[in-house]
Image (tube, rainbow, N blue to C red):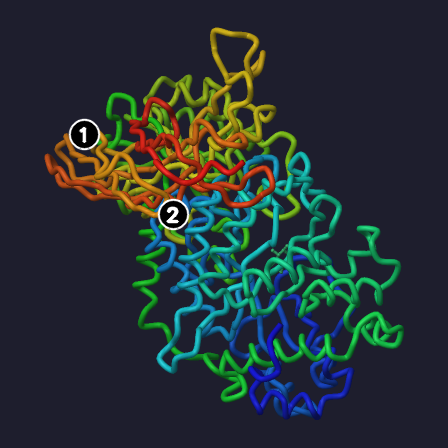
């Protein structure tokens, strides 16, 4: 808890004048309703501002609206306490970047930080003080629509993403105040919902919590994240919004997190739906006890806390602790000095640079998975651009696009026409997202027949993936498959671009029939130019998949970090783990992706092949660009502990790096290793480091065929009884 001593005299003076209703008002966050991110509430926030019964607003932005709301609070309410404003600035605010699942495929910590910094500059100027991001829920089930918001299947990648995002959002401005407070979400294990059903229970073991779902949040706390949002779900029967052990126990006490805990939308009152609170007062008490400071959009704190106080279910001290944290946050954001900080600051001079970064992020996120006969870079003089996603200015922004406007998007049609100025680029929509268009397929086929090559852009609209968008059939809509079938039959070489926000199940013929295949994601405002840069060769693709791509829905969840089992998969032994009706491996593995350059790796070397428990060593490998074009190679470092006290994952990702090489250039890539990097949680969930062999793998993806191996021996360290 924040000690009273840490609370400034100014905050203490304000608190001393507050009535109970005004204190509870500071703990209430209401939506103004510009963007709907949950069921609408009964409130009129502006009335409540005047009465001091709200401390922050969400889902409102724009200088005039923010300024007016703030003016009412500061000049017309009794105590004039400033509001703060929150919004889901998840992948850009006006210059929209690729959806997070796409940008994670860049495997570029610096890029992740830069795009967050640009988002903060844009949101700050629109009067936003907190973003409900980064979303760092490890996700491995493609039925769950919110997989789009995270950095994929791996805890380490989500942790690195968290660090970069928090640094970027919370970078200080010229006055030394952070521009945008990050709110890491959703704490925790939201990605483990039953069968991918959004909001459903997440029944995970204590081990899986600590090995998979908690590490990204630990990283965010280590990076001084300003706020954390609990998940809607219950974890093994304990609703996260009331999870005292994980929030007050682990988060605040063990990890020392002293920021704000902001509930998810209406989640405090939904403790009654969880069946753990009989009324709003009980719900409010449970949440406050667990450490929640701000109730987003529910009636629980405003109506329930006064009753809970009367019942003795909460103390005034607990309420004061939460109020002190909220006011300290506002002070830290400079709002007591200048409640109108940032609103309306002119950032137009940097717009071109922010759009250029949006394009760069899209270029580095688009994954090239096939390029038969080196079809790309495209040399065709006439190109038939086909498909509904080629002209989808809103949908290319993806879900959670904040203030991003389709009118400011550069579509794929526009991008290709600019990027292939010397070629004839025809366009035929072919069909709608989920339905045929009269004559659409015929027009598309005609266009294909008249061209040298086809660029076919299919996928999903942006609302088919995201919150409350779980799907039992995460597939390309039938109308678009019908279009693809007809276009393939025209017999011209096809570049297939999948514009999606999650891995969708693909029919074999769609993949096999494409000469080239790219995952374009929903890549943001500049998706068109970015794709054109890749197809024309102006940019050499360098993205790699951050999530395994299942062959069928039945195969999900599938991920590289599975445990070996007693009967590891053996294609020649039916009595081994696998399926009768689907391959064991995903269609595409974590880390897959190619470019126009080709690289070779020398043999792996360790400075010391045997180290003791306190030692460090370095793994080195020479990488050579053996092609005639410059390129960027991504290398992953995995580890496997073959014998331990508990079963260990088949592969654990320990590091990743990218290296840019000119044609013919060789460079040495090195990974620093500490023996402690290979400790694990024993059967009692206590850290343990054994002596023995650790297998290290370095390569371009999680596929065995892409990995080289070397063994590190840890030579001492008592083998505990
Ligand atoms: C939503 C989401 C959460 C978001 C919040 C505010 O329900 O669960 O991620 O930040 O409401 O929009």
Could you tell which of marks 2 and 1 lies nearer the N-terminus? 2
* 636, 540: nearer the viewer: 636
Q: Is residue 432 left or right of residue 57?
A: left
Residue under the point 58% across and 91% down: 10
Q: Is residue 413 visible?
A: no
Residue under the point 51% across and 77% down: 63
Residue 527 — which label? 2
Q: Secondary structure at mark 2?
A: helix
Circle 1 Cα neighbour tier, 10 Å, few/some/many (<14 / 14–19 / ≥20): few
Q: Is residue 187 left or right of residue 612?
A: right
The quadrant the N terminus occupies is bottom right
Q: Point out residue 698 in the picture as x, y percentages from the top left corner.
A: 31, 33
Q: Is residue 120 visible?
A: yes
Give the residue number, with chain letter if any, for mark 1.
Answer: 602
* 178, 708: nearer the viewer: 708
The quadrant the C terminus occupies is top right
* 24, 474: nearer the viewer: 24
* 183, 244: nearer the viewer: 244
């Amino acid at each position: 808890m924040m000690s009273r001593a840490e609370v400034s005299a100014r905050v203490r003076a304000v608190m001393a004048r507050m009535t109970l209703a005004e204190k509870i008002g500071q703990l209430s966050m209401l939506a103004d309703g510009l963007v709907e991110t949950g069921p609408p509430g009964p409130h009129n926030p502006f009335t409540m501002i005047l009465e001091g019964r709200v401390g922050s607003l969400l889902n409102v932005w724009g200088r005039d609206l923010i300024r007016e709301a703030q003016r009412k609070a500061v000049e017309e309410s009794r105590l004039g306490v400033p509001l703060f404003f929150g919004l889901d600035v998840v992948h850009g605010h006006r210059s929209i970047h690729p959806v997070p699942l796409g940008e994670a495929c860049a495997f570029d910590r610096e890029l992740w930080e830069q795009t967050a910094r640009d988002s903060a500059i844009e949101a700050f100027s629109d009067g936003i003080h907190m973003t409900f991001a980064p979303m760092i829920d490890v996700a491995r089930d493609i039925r769950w629509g919110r997989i789009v918001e995270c950095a994929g299947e791996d805890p380490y990648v989500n942790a690195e993403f968290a660090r970069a995002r928090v640094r970027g959002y919370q970078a200080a401005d010229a006055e030394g105040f952070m521009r945008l407070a990050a709110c890491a979400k959703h704490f925790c294990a939201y990605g483990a919902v039953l069968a991918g059903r959004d909001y459903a229970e997440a029944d995970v073991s204590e081990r899986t919590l600590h090995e998979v779902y908690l590490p990204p949040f630990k990283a965010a706390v280590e990076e001084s994240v300003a706020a954390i949002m609990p998940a809607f779900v219950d974890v093994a029967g304990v609703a996260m919004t009331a999870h005292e052990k994980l929030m007050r126990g682990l988060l605040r006490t063990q990890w020392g997190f002293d920021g704000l805990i902001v509930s998810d939308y209406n989640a405090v009152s939904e403790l009654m739906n969880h069946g753990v609170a009989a009324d709003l007062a009980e719900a409010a008490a449970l949440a406050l006890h667990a450490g929640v400071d701000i109730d987003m959009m529910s009636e629980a704190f405003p109506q329930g806390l006064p009753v809970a106080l009367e019942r003795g279910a909460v103390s005034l001290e607990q309420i004061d602790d939460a109020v002190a944290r909220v006011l300290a946050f506002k002070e830290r954001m400079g709002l007591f000095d200048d409640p109108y900080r940032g609103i309306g600051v002119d950032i137009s001079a940097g717009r071109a640079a922010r759009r250029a970064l949006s394009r760069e992020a899209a270029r580095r996120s688009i994954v090239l998975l096939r390029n038969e006969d080196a079809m790309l870079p495209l040399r065709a003089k006439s190109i038939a651009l086909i498909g509904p996603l080629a002209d989808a200015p809103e949908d290319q922004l993806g879900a959670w696009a904040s203030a991003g406007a389709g009118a400011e998007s550069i579509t794929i049609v526009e991008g290709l026409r600019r990027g292939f100025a010397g070629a004839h680029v025809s366009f035929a929509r072919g069909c709608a997202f989920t339905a045929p268009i009269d004559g659409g397929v015929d027009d598309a086929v005609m266009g294909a027949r008249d061209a040298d090559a086809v660029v076919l852009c299919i996928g999903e609209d942006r609302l088919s993936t995201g919150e409350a968008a779980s799907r039992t059939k995460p597939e390309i809509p039938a109308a678009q498959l019908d279009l693809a079938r007809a276009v393939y039959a025209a017999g011209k070489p096809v570049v297939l671009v999948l514009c999606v926000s999650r891995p969708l199940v693909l029919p074999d013929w769609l993949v096999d029939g494409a000469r080239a295949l790219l995952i374009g994601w929903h890549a943001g405002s500049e998706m068109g130019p970015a794709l054109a840069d890749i197809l024309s060769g102006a940019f050499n693709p360098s993205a790699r998949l951050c999530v395994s791509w299942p062959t069928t829905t039945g195969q999900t969840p599938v991920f590289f970090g599975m445990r070996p089992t007693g009967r590891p998969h053996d294609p020649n032994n039916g009595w081994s783990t696998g399926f009768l009706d689907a391959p064991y491996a995903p269609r595409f593995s974590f880390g897959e992706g190619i470019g126009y350059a080709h690289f070779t790796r020398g043999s792996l070397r360790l400075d010391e092949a045997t180290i003791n428990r306190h030692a460090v060593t370095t793994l080195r490998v020479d990488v050579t660009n053996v092609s005639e074009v410059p390129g960027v190679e991504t290398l992953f470092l995995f580890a496997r502990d073959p014998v331990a006290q508990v079963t260990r994952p088949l592969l654990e990702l320990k590091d990743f790096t990218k290296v840019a090489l000119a044609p013919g250039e060789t460079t040495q890539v090195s990974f620093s290793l500490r023996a402690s990097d290979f400790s694990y949680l024993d059967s009692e969930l206590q850290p343990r480091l054994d002596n023995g062999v650790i297998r290290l793998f370095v390569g371009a993806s999680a596929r065995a065929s892409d990995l080289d191996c070397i063994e590190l021996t840890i030579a001492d360290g008592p083998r505990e009884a």
